[in-house]
Image (spheres, helix red, strand yellow):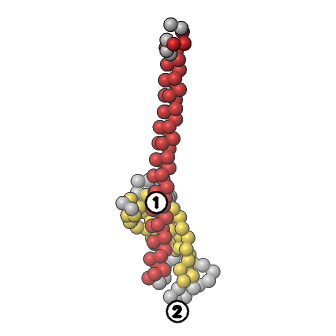
């Protein structure tokens, strides 16, 4: 039998296995990073919804909140979140600026979303 018909040498098999192991490790890392990015994106999307809900709730109720800071907790999409509203006056006495920051309960020092909106005063309120 000629040398070409005998099959692969041990070195050739080891090189092929090494290449395959490197490719599989890279694929596993890419998959892991994709999962992590997906979880972060989900958390930020849900936090943004919480902030939008807080602003929409005040607008729908036609609230005229006092200047200051208020905080609370809620759950969105099964994830517990903490929100903080900062209300400040504006140069126009008929508007209030509301800034809503949302933090996931799992990482309370990491802000997941921040939204700023303005509330118009109900008829006659100018304080």
Task: Give the numbered dot on residue 103.
Answer: 1
Residue under the point 46% across and 66% down: 49
Mark 1 neighbour density, 10 Å: few (under 14) some (14–19) many (20 or more): many
For mark 2, what is the residue? 124
* Residue found farthest to the right: 91
Q: Position of residue 35 (x, y in %)?
A: 46, 47
Most foreground residue, 68 or 33: 33
Most foreground residue, 106 or 47: 47
Most foreground residue, 30 or 66: 30
Mark 2 and mark 1 in contact? Answer it, CB < 8 Å.
no
Q: Position of residue 91 (x, y in %)?
A: 63, 80
- Camera-side mark, 2 or 1: 1
Q: Position of residue 100 (x, y in %)?
A: 50, 68
* Residue found farthest to the top: 1
Please indicate, yes or no, whether residue 120 appears anywhere in the rendered image.
yes
Question: What distance separates the C-alpha of mark 2 from that of mark 1?
Answer: 35 Å
The picture quadrant where one finds residue 3 is top right
């Amino acid at each position: 039998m000629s040398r070409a018909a005998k099959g692969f040498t041990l070195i050739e098999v080891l090189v092929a296995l090494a290449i395959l192991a490197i490719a599989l490790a890279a694929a596993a890392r890419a998959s892991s990073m994709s999962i992590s990015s997906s979880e972060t994106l989900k958390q930020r999307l849900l936090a943004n919804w919480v902030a939008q809900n807080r602003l929409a709730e005040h607008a729908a109720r036609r609230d005229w909140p006092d200047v200051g800071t208020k905080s609370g907790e809620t759950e969105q999409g099964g994830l517990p979140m903490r929100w903080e509203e900062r209300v400040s006056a504006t140069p126009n006495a008929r508007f209030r600026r509301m800034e809503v920051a949302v933090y996931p309960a799992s990482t309370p020092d990491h802000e997941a979303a921040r939204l700023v909106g303005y509330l118009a005063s109900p008829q006659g309120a100018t304080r």
